[in-house]
Image (cartoon, rainbow, N blue to C red):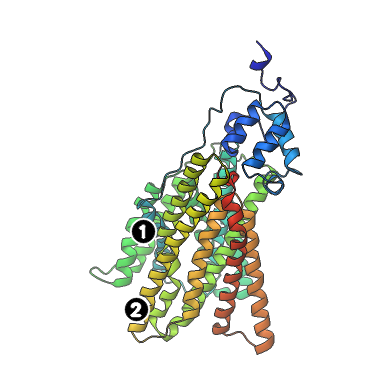
Amino acid sequence: MTTLDTPGVAAGHGAAPCDATSEFTGRPDQWSALPPAVAEVCATAVDPLEIAATMEVCGVSDREARDRFHQPDLFVMARELFRTTPFRLARPTHPRRQLRPGASVDLGRGALFALHSLIFAAAIRGSGLQLPWWACPLALTCGWAFSQGVASTMYSLRNRGATSDAAVLWGLVVALVGGAGVGLLGVEWLGPRSAMFGSVGVVAAFSVYVTAFAILLVHEELAAVTATLIPCVLLALLYFNGWPVVVPGKVVTGIVGAALLLVLVASLRHAARQWWRRPRLLAGDRRLALRHVITGICSGLAISVTAVLAGDESRSGSLVVLSAYPIVITLGVLEWQLRSYRFRANQALDRTGGSALFAGAAFGAFLRALGWYVTSLACVSGVIAGVVLSHGQHLPVTLLVTDDLLGVVFFVGLVVASCSRVDLVMRSWLAGVVTFAVGLLAAHILEGTVGFGGAEIVAAVATSVVLICLALVARRVVDAPFSYA
């Protein structure tokens, strides 16, 4: 056997074993985390400077080295790659995973996300529960946050080549305990205590359900979830309309509860047999999961604020509540265009090899997808405005514009997060939350109270701040070939 056949003992590649906490393991299945050109050079380089030069050409900067790989600078990162990557003459045997373009099936996928609120609303009304105003918004926020954290953890384990089954049961337990705890805090701070059972139960149940739903999505079992929820959607529509068949509320609640239990059982099929085994997470995995949880909290709060404001506006007319629905109705288009953008960007990367031509192609794909999504938002908002005005009801323009801005924020945020920069998305959301809190405080100091009209203006300003923060970083993230590894 020659030195060329021995991993890590040729051309200066270090033979020392890699630390268990290192970002780079040197295994071939980890090359998928690097641009193809960098992965190839890492295996054949005779000097770390070759790797550093290739990374610079592919758009990997010192900032990328610090933020994404926690290395002091680009050259330290190149030396670490040189030390831990086995020397090989062959090209990597694990090519970058090919993505599918957006398709009409994504419209149904987005509609399925939007129908969760309809199903739970029917179940709650059918059960006769009298919930305080904060229970449903808090349930939405907790469900969004816990599901984001669990999905992030599972993907992190998979990207390291480890199994994600240990994260399933622990994620569901965290969602259950966390949702119940947050519900208890809501009862303690906002009351009333008489609604403790219903409020805590709804927050905990919704948190567990959405987390189980996210686990099934990670395992790409959307068809099974759809088959379970479609009957619930039909029953909910019959229950609310009362035609052509009157469905008793208790029946709706029972069937919806059974469907949610089926989703939970289906997710538990992916749990580890040794249920007590905890997932082995690195420090970077925990940081990433925490960022997704914080982003989920901010996203859920934004949707909840819009829903609460729309509920107050609906006192002037039952159709006014539709002003909070453009983002919900266009979820399918968002999913479609997000996939289409990623597909076109990856095609451009294959075509240009990460050269200077890639930046223009990737940003063009981003603008094209964003344009289609904004067009769908505008069309839906126009239809809603026409319906509300045609019935002689008041149109809350500020709230409608805020919901459209929120849709654009979600789209741009998902693009940036899909490029592995959820940290930038989190900071943008936190800037918006701070703006919203400061705005409410300023309005309270100046006016003595904060009305719903003032809250709508503050919400619009805060959403605009989030969008501006994302717009300032989106071009840099989209243009970097390293974002599509």
Disc 2 marks a residue whose amino acid type is Val
SS for tag 2? helix
Q: Quadrant of the N terminus?
A: top right
At 25% across and 71% down in the image, what residue appears? Answer: 243
Residue closer to the observer: 280 or 245: 280
Image depth: mark 1 or mark 2 in front: 2
Q: Quadrant of the C terminus?
A: top right
Q: Is residue 209 left or right of residue 86?
A: left
Residue 231 percent across, percent down from the top left: 32, 57
The answer to the question of whether label 1 and label 2 lie on touching residues, with beta carbons closer than 8 A, is no
| Residue that extends furthest to the top in the rendered view of this protein | 1
At 57% across and 23% down in the image, what residue appears? Answer: 90
At 56% across and 28% down in the image, what residue appears? Answer: 92
Crowd tier of the residue under label 1, counting other residues whose Cα lies within 10 Å: few below 14, some 14–19, many 20 or above? some
Residue 47 percent across, percent down from the top left: 72, 28
At 67% across and 50% down in the image, what residue appears? Answer: 287
* Residue on which disc 2 sits: 387
Q: CA distance from mark 1 to mark 2?
A: 33 Å
Residue 27 percent across, percent down from the top left: 62, 29
| Residue that extends furthest to the bottom in the rendered view of this protein | 447
The label shown at residue 173 is none
* Residue on which disc 1 sits: 255
Residue closer to the observer: 405 or 217: 405
Residue closer to the observer: 431 or 124: 431
- Against 316, is 220 above or below? above
Q: Is residue 178 visible?
A: no
